[in-house]
Image: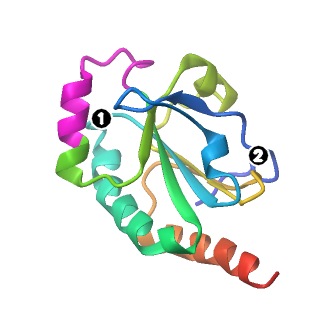
Amino acid sequence: RALIGWEGRALPAISGRSFAGRQASFEEFENKVLLVYVWFTNCPPCVKIGPELVALQQHYSGEGFSVLGLNADRVLKLEYDDAYRADYTKKIGINYTNLHLTPKVRASLGNVNIFPTLFLVSPDGTILKHYVNYQSPEVLRMAIEGVLSLGADE
């Protein structure tokens, strides 16, 4: 179920380093429907939703949709290193950009402390839905298709 409070607000500026060390930012996703996924390694609902997000990315990427992962391991001071994260993401088959969540970005997103937290963002950067904890593929698919169909009507 989506939460009230973030809907209609602009997505805060998001930037960070990818797992490969490349600097990346939200601007790379302008004009796309974006699902921002805040997670940490081995979080049980994140383990469950991870492969489902891979499938959504694969299915909708050609229609102007992308997932952007923000991994909270470092801000949570978890012991996982980049090599472990790389193995973990390879095992799941992650096919979308993942950045290290920074304290500044975490604060701008309401100090996310329930994982996963997801924000569905319109192509103009407006947050349309805010989800906390595991969401079924059907819930996410319906929300994504709803936003993508708005763009098709223009």
Farthest residue to the bottom: give it: 153
Pointer 1: what residue?
41
**Mark 1 Cα-neighbour bin, 10 Å: few <14, some 14–19, many ≥20:** some
Q: Position of residue 134 (x, y in %)?
A: 42, 54
Looking at marks 2 and 1 on the same chain, the residue that comes earlier in the sequence is marked by: 2
Q: Position of residue 150 (x, y in %)?
A: 75, 77
Whether 79 is among the magenta residues is yes
- Horizontal side of 54 relative to 126 (left or right) equals left
Pointer 2: what residue?
5
Tag 2: residue type? Answer: Gly
- Horizontal side of 106 relative to 101 (left or right) equals right
The magenta stretch spans which residues?
73-88
Tag 1: residue type? Answer: Thr
Rendered position, 92 above or below 23 = below
Task: Mark 2 vs mark 1: give the one in front.
Answer: 1
Q: Position of residue 15 (x, y in %)?
A: 59, 30
Tag 2 secondary structure: loop
- Horizontal side of 81 relative to 124 (left or right) equals left
Q: Residue at x 74, y 76 (%)?
A: 151
